């Protein structure tokens, strides 16, 4: 995240609307606006707004770009990673069956179970279920007993594959087990696809191709997190047969079949008995502006000097840690951990002040501008400051606000 435009929190458009703006030390969180869109993407969106274009043509161009970047056969731009999960499930269930596409989310008579290791389940599972899938979760929480057991064994996954299975879903984090390539081998032995949720796994850029190389049939990334494209975009990369199914279930299908000729490299109509009507993906539409914005953000993300961005994050994290420590709070800086791609400042509030982590989080959020620090470790008495979405000035501001709100 090299360029940082100047941001004024007292003179923003939100201020004009009488809505408090947010200084974001919590990372790329959708509820506070995700990430800051790149200038390249904004400019491209403005330009895209000036002219009409056929969305299928634009998706085909995006597909070429995504294929190049990921090494997958094809790609598609969705209205977020969660929409990508829903469409991936729809593609796994309906395949090239136009009548099935027309029926979703009604899956009666269709294999529609999606297997998931229990420890991969998240709130985003709802996106898979939205397509009509039923989730079958597998495994135990034994790992947390510290007995040496794992969460789920490959044989447990294999034993749960039946005629009703449509896919295996896999949530990618550095701690998820079993390894993706092992799960993909099992899936492919049974001719079912693996859908990988890698929404927040960028950067590093190497992750674009990593999961495809490990055997993912479909992998989903958020466009509004590390890539810094439009908030409402996501990417699906994967096998042509599934991307084609996604396209047919997502594009606006009020078309005269005889006159409709989508780009063949995106949709080969010979594979289908006809064209379906508006599909399960129609309420998740992607505008031409968002599509173009995503393509330009992707290009800029690819060209960006990664080590430079990492260094900026590291410096910002250390700046916050230093100021907060000087005020008497115990902190440590993580080197990017299991759940975050950036280094983070973990502040032990309960252990080094009279204030609780919960009180601190609440107070900061009640300010104007609101200050958001990560609250995922409140139960351990800690708050977390993430540098990804801050400017240098804001990093200083966040440190000040933290210090001002605790009694040491
Ligand atoms: C953010 C996230 C999503 C959703 O991504 P959107 O682009 O906001 O739809 C899905 N899964 C995981 C693990 C995420 O972190």
Image: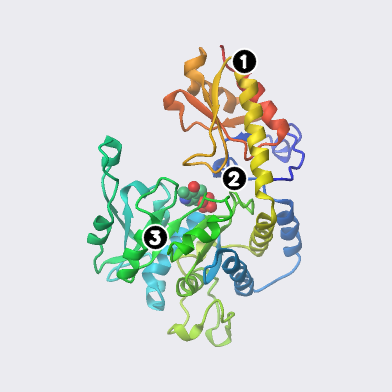
Report which quarter residue 95 is drawn in.
bottom left
Instruction: Give the residue at x 64% y 50%.
Output: 228
Quadrant of the snapshot with the N terminus: top right
Q: Is residue 70 above or below residue 73?
A: above
**Helix or strand or loop: what does disc 3 sit on?**
helix
Count of numbered circles on the image: 3
**Is there CB contact under 8 Å for labels 1 and 3?**
no
Question: Label 1 belongs to which residue?
Answer: 327
Specify whether residue 22 is in view: no
Report which quarter residue 393 is drawn in.
top right
**Helix or strand or loop: what does disc 1 sit on?**
loop
Instruction: Give the residue at x 62% y 52%.
Output: 227
Q: Using a 10 Å C-alpha cutoff, classify the residue at mark 3 as few (fewer than 14 neighbours), some (14 to 19) or many (20 or more).
A: some
Point out residue 130 in the picture as x, y percentages from the top left corner: 40, 58
Q: In 3D space, how far apart are the residues under numbered discs 2 and 1 (Cα atoms)?
A: 30 Å
Specify whether residue 217 is in view: yes
Q: Is residue 326 above or below residue 57?
A: above
Q: Using a 10 Å C-alpha cutoff, classify the residue at mark 1 as few (fewer than 14 neighbours), some (14 to 19) or many (20 or more).
A: some
Report which quarter residue 26 is drawn in.
top right
Question: Residue 181 shows which numbered tag?
Answer: 3
Question: Residue 34 shows which numbered tag?
Answer: 2
Instruction: Give the residue at x 47% y 63%.
Output: 213
Q: Is residue 274 above or below residue 48?
A: below
- Give whichever of 215, 13 is nearer the camera: 215
Q: How is the image coloured?
A: rainbow
Point out residue 51 in the picture as x, y percentages from the top left corner: 74, 69
Q: Is residue 293 above or below residue 318?
A: below
Left or right: residue 151 versus residue 271 is left
Eye-nearest disc, 1 or 3: 3
């Amino acid at each position: 995240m090299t360029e940082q435009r100047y941001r004024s929190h007292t003179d923003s458009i939100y201020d004009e609307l009488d809505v408090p703006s947010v200084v974001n030390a919590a990372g790329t969180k959708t509820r506070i606006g995700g990430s800051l869109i790149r200038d390249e993407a904004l400019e491209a969106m403005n330009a895209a707004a000036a002219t009409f274009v056929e969305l299928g043509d634009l998706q085909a161009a995006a597909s070429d770009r995504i294929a190049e970047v990921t090494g997958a056969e094809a790609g598609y731009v969705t209205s977020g990673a969660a929409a990508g999960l829903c469409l991936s499930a729809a593609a796994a269930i309906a395949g090239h069956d136009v009548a099935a596409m027309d029926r979703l989310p009604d899956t009666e008579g269709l294999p529609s179970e999606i297997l998931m290791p229990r420890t991969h389940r998240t709130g985003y599972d709802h996106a898979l279920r939205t397509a009509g899938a039923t989730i079958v979760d597998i495994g135990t929480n034994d790992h947390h007993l510290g007995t040496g057991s794992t969460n789920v064994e490959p044989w447990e996954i294999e034993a749960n594959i039946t005629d009703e299975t449509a896919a295996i879903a896999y949530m990618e984090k550095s701690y998820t087990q079993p390894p993706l390539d092992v799960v993909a081998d099992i899936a492919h032995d049974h001719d079912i696809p693996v859908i990988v949720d890698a929404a927040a796994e960028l950067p590093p850029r190497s992750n674009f191709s990593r999961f495809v190389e490990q055997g993912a049939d479909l992998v989903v990334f958020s466009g509004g997190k590390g890539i810094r494209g439009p908030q409402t975009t996501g990417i699906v990369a994967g096998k042509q047969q599934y991307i084609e199914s996604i396209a047919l279930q997502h594009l606006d299908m009020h078309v005269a079949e005889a006159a409709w000729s989508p780009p063949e490299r995106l949709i080969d109509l010979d594979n289908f008995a006809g064209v379906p009507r508006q599909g399960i993906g129609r309420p998740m539409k992607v505008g031409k502006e968002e599509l173009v914005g995503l393509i330009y953000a992707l290009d800029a993300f690819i060209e960006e000097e990664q080590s430079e961005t990492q260094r900026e994050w590291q410096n910002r994290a250390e700046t916050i840690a230093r100021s907060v420590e000087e005020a008497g709070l115990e902190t440590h800086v993580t080197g990017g951990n299991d759940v975050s791609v950036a280094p983070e400042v973990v502040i032990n509030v309960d252990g080094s002040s009279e204030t609780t982590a919960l009180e601190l989080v609440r107070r900061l959020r009640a300010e104007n501008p609101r200050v958001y620090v990560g609250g995922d470790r409140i139960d351990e008495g800690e708050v977390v400051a993430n540098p990804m979405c801050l400017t240098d000035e804001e990093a200083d501001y966040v440190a000040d606000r933290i210090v001002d709100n605790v009694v040491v």
